[in-house]
Image (cartoon, rainbow, N blue to C red):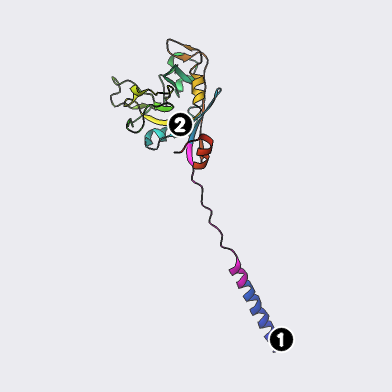
Amino acid sequence: MKNLSLLLIAIAFLFLQCSKSATDQPTPTPVVPVATEKIIEIKTSFGNMYMWLYKETPKHRANFLALADTNYFDNTTFHRIVTNFVIQGGDLNSKDANTANDGQGGPPWTVTAEIDSSKFKHVYGAVGAARLPNSVNPLRASNGSQFYIVLPTAGTPNLDGEYTVFGQIIKGMDVAATIVKQPNNPSNNRPYTDIKMDVNVLNKTLQQIKDEYNFVP
């Protein structure tokens, strides 16, 4: 009987110790995922440019992200460079050997205009969507892939209200300034040498965006 009592006491002691150990364990701190934003990287042989896409132009933003995610833009060129105006690219036709069709292509869709010049103007570094003229495109729908970057420091206000501005270059405008200086054919503003791009989608935290691009969304 004495041995049985000692055994019961030992079991009770072990149970209390186990309960205490379980109670003493620190509560795990839940891991909160860090929110990220999407940044567009445009790599060229002259350097890289980084673009912020406006969430207020959701159709253009979604379209550009989808094309970038599927490598549509890779090896397309900046086929039009105009001093003190814009550089333009993103045409699938610019991948082929026929330079005469550059600027005439794109995916088999257009993007509904999201023009709001009260919010987004053609300021220095603005990214806009190219399109066909009003005579054949009265609703001002954008080409499905071609885009341009505004170069003058004073902007190009004459384009406000006519084209959708859907983004902004937040780093690398010096690269755009170099591109526009390349020798080109004055009859169509096409560079004599292909200026190819490689477009990627980067995920960055707000702090990384501030630190790396000196930009606050």
What percent of the width, then of the height, locates residue 54?
40, 35
22 is within the stretch colored magenta:
yes
Horizontal arrangement in the rendering, residue 115 relative to residue 19 (left or right): left
Which residue is drawn at the image coordinates 58% and 63% (left, top)?
26
**Residue 212 position in % (x across, y down):** 53, 36
At horizontal 65% and vertical 78% (from top left) the residue drawn is 13
Q: Secondary structure at mark 2?
A: helix
- The circle on residue 3 is 1
Q: Secondary structure at mark 1?
A: helix
Q: In the rendered image, which quarter contains the C terminus?
A: top left
Residue 124 versus residue 210 in the image, above or below: above
User: Where in the figure is residue 141, as x and y percent of width and height?
Assistant: 33, 27
203 drawn magenta: no
Asked whether the beta carbons under mark 1 and mark 2 sit within 8 Å of each other, the answer is no
Residue type for callout 1: Asn
Vertical arrangement, residue 60 with respect to residue 185, above or below: below
Front residue of 80/116: it is: 116
Give, as a single range, the part of the protein colored magenta.
19-38
Q: Earlier in the sequence, mark 1 or mark 2?
A: 1
- Residue at the spot of label 2: 67
| Residue 58: quarter of image | top left
Q: Main secondary structure of the magenta part?
A: loop
